[in-house]
Image: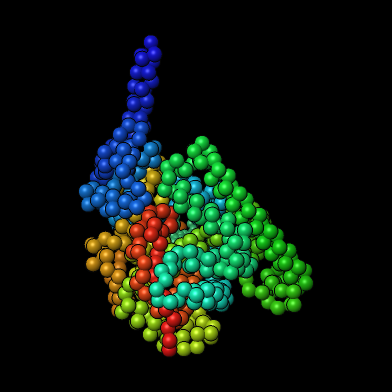
Amino acid sequence: MYLELIAIILTTLFVWDYMKNRRHNVMYAAAGISGPRSYPFVGMAPMMIHESPKTVFDLQFRMIAQYGKNIKMNMMGERGFMTADPKMIEAIMSSQQTIQKNNLYGLLVNWLGDGLLISKGKKWFRRRKIITPAFHFKILEDFVEVFDQQSAVMVQQLYDRADGKTVINMFPVACLCAMDIIAETAMGVKIDAQLQPQFPYVQSVTTASGMLAERFMNPLQRTDSLMKIFYPKLLTKLGDSVKNMHSFTNSVITERRDLLQKSIAETGNANADLLNDVGQKRRMALLDVLLQSTIDGAPLSNDDIREEVDTFMFEGHDTTTSSIAFTCYLLARHPEVQARAFQEIRDVLGDDKSAPVTMQQLGELKYLECVIKESLRLFPSVPLIGRHITEDTVLDGKLIPAHSDVVILIYHAQRDPDYFPDPEKFLPERFSLERKGEINPFAYTPFSAGPRNCIGQKFAMLEIKSTISKMLRHFELLPLGEDVQLVLNLILRSSTGINCGIKPRVY
Ligand code: HEM
C-alpha cells in the first residue's frame, strides 16, 4: 500500500516537473541554446557537486567551449541561461523589458531593503530619476577632497610595512579606506574606519559584507530558513550587524534632516546650502540630495532614504575595494606599466605629495585611466550579474521564454579572445585614445550598461584614480606574496589575498 502511494506521488512529481519544464525546453531548443544535462527536480546540480566557487570560473569557460556563449541552465528550480555573448549582452542590457533582477540579489535584501540596486518597475524608475543628480559633476568635484584626504590616511598607515619585504594583502587595506570615503560622501559623516577599525558601524559593515560573500558560496546559507536550521548563530550575528547598521544610518539621516530644516528656517530657502555650527557651507552628501528630493510632491521618508544610503554603502565600498586592490596587484607585477603610470602622475601632480589633488588633474591622468580599465577587464569587481525575464521576449533574434533567469558572465566576456587578443595579458594600451572604437562596448561591461548601469561609475573612477595615484606617489609596488586565486562571489575576491609589497619612493 505504502509502496503504491510512494510510486503514485513520485510519478505525479516527475510528470509535474516534466510539464513545468517542457515549454522552456522546447523554446530553448528552438532558440538554439543548449547546456549540460538536466535531471528531474535538481537540474544540473549533480555536475556541480565537485565544483566550488574557486573552480566555477573554469567550469564556465569549459561550458562556453562546449555549448557556445549562450548556455542553458537549470539549477534547483532556477531555469534560464548564462551568456558571455556580447550580442546577447547588448540585447539584455539595452532593453527596458529585462531590467528586473533575479533572486541572486535576495541575499542583500535584509541589509539594503528595496534600494536602487534591487528595486524594480515604477519604484526603480522614479528613484533612479531622483538619485541621478546626486552624482552630478559639481557634487563629485567636492568629493575629490575626501578621496584625497582618505587616501593620504591610507598611505600614512602603510609606511609601517613599507620595508620591501612584508607581504601586504591590499583588500582589507583598501576596504577601510573605501569605507571611510563612502561614509563621508554618502552620509556626510567621518567614521574613521582606517584609524578605528573597531568602531561598531565599521565592524558591522565588515561582518555583513564578509557574511554575504560566504552566503553566496554556501548553498546551505542561501535562504534565511536554511540558515535558521544549519547556521542559527551566524544568522543572529548577521541580524545584529544589520540592526546596528540600520540604527546608525537612521541616526545620521535624522540628524541631517534636522540640520537641513534648520538651514531652511534660517535662510527661508528650500534649496538652502547646509551650514555648519559656525555658519560655513557644508559639503553636500549624497544623502542631502535625497533629503531635498520629492516624489509626487512628497519628500522621501527616512526609511526610503535609508535603503538608498545603505545601497550606496554596500555598492560603493566593496566594488572599489576590489578594483583598488587588483590594480595594485597588477602594477606590482608589471614594473614597466607602473613606471609609466608613475611618470604620468609626477608630470601631472608634481612632486609635492601634500598638495591637494583636483578633479581636473585626475582627469588628466589618461594612462592611469587605461591601467584601471584594463585591471577592471581582467578582474571585474562585479564578475556576473543576474536578470529575471518576466515575459516571452525576443533577445538577439531568439525567443526566450517567460520566467527565465539570466546570468551575464561579465568576467568571461571580458576574457574572450574573439574580442580581446591575448586576453590573459595585462595591456593597458588597449584602452588608449588612439585605439578608441576597437573595443566592443558590450564585451567590456564592468559597470554594466544601458538603463540599469552603475550610477556610481564616475565616482568610482575618480576614487580609484585618487587612491592609486596616492599609492604610486608614495611607494614602489613590489611583486610579493602568493598569486591571486579568484573566488566567484557577488564581488570578485581572492582566497589567497590580493598581495604585494611596498617600499617608499625617493624623489
Ligand atoms: C569599481 C567600482 C564599481 C563597479 C565595478 C560597479 C559595478 C556595477 C555594476 C556591474 C552594476 C550593475 C549591477 C546589476 O545590474 O545588478 C552596478 C550598479 C550600481 N552601482 Fe556600481 N560599481 C562600482 C562602484 C559604485 C559606487 C562607488 C557606487 C555608489 C557610490 C555604486 C552604486 C551603484 C548602484 C546604486 C547601482 C544600482 C543601479 C541601478 O540598478 O539603477 N557603484 N555597479
Of residues 363 and 39, the one drawn nearer to the viewer in this rendering: 39
Picture layout, residue 408 above or below residue 417? above
Residue at (27% x, 65% y) in the render: 424
Residue at coordinates 39% horizontally, 40% vertically from top-left? 78
Q: Residue furthest left?
A: 66
- 507 left or right of 63? right
Residue at 36% x, 40% y is 75
63, above or below 353, in the image: above
Q: Left of 414 or right of it: where is 150? A: right
The residue nearer to you, when weighing 199 against 163, is 163
Residue 238, can we see it? yes
* Residue 478 position in % (x across, y down): 37, 74
**Residue 309 visible in the picture:** no
Q: Residue furthest top?
A: 1
Total marks drawn? 0
Q: Is residue 172 above or below residue 145?
A: above
Q: Residue at x 38, y 10 (%)?
A: 1
Q: Quadrant of the C terminus?
A: bottom left
Left/right of residue 53 with respect to residue 265 in the rendered view:
left
Tell me the quarter of the picture where residue 50 sits: top left
Q: How is the image coloured?
A: rainbow
Q: Between 88 and 253, which is closer to the camera in this rendering? A: 253
Residue 178: x %, y % from top left? 52, 67
Counting from the top left corner in percent of width and height, residue 472 is at 43, 79
